Amino acid sequence: MSDFEEIGWSLDVPDGWDAEDLDDVAIFSHPEGVGVLQVGGLEKDEAVTQEDLEQLAAEQLEAGLRPEKVIAGDFRGISFVQRGDGEFWQFWYLAADHLALEISYNCADDDRNEEIETVREMIGSLAFERD
């Protein structure tokens, strides 16, 4: 297990998983895995509110998906599961203080159980890194 740190947040990366830091998103995947986890962060001058998270999740809410309240490490927010057209998606919209995280995991629907527990453990390891 290794630690991946980004400005404002970090998470545990399991052995064998790759982490790539692009300008506005971090991408995690296993070379022999079935899906991709993406994490992007947004900072505000003041604390992120539930309404802010709902704005970020507008596409899922407008599609009629039901949010589930979640606690993920130091973050709190909402999560959605979406299945269709042979694809599985899970979305998390999380906040800690002035930082919001937009997170998605996707894979083929038939493979959805292959690594989702590992992905959820990674999300559960999220730490808010105070300035």
Image (cartoon, helix red, strand yellow):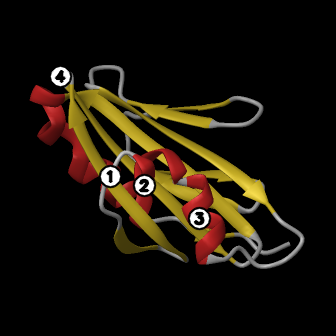
Q: Secondary structure at mark 2?
A: helix
Residue positioned 49% across, 71% down in the render: 77
> Mark 3 and mark 1: span between their CA atoms?
16 Å
Is the residue marked by circle 4 packed among few (<14), some (14-19), or many (20+) residues within 10 Å?
A: few
Sequence-wise, the earlier of marks 3 and 1 is: 3
**Amino acid type, mark 3:** Leu
**Amino acid type, mark 2:** Leu
- Residue 102 lies, in percent from the top left, at 57, 51
Residue with the mark numbered 4: 86
CB atoms of marks 1 and 2 within 8 Å: yes
**Amino acid type, mark 4:** Gly
Residue with the mark numbered 1: 64
Residue with the mark numbered 2: 61
Q: Nearer the viewer, residue 105 or 26?
A: 105
Residue with the mark numbered 3: 53
Q: Secondary structure at mark 3?
A: helix
Q: Quadrant of residue 27?
A: top right
Where is 16 relative to 118, above or below?
A: above
- Residue 60 lies, in percent from the top left, at 42, 48
Relative to 67, is 22 on the left or the right? right
> Mark 4 and mark 2: span between their CA atoms?
21 Å
> Mark 2 and mark 3: span between their CA atoms?
11 Å
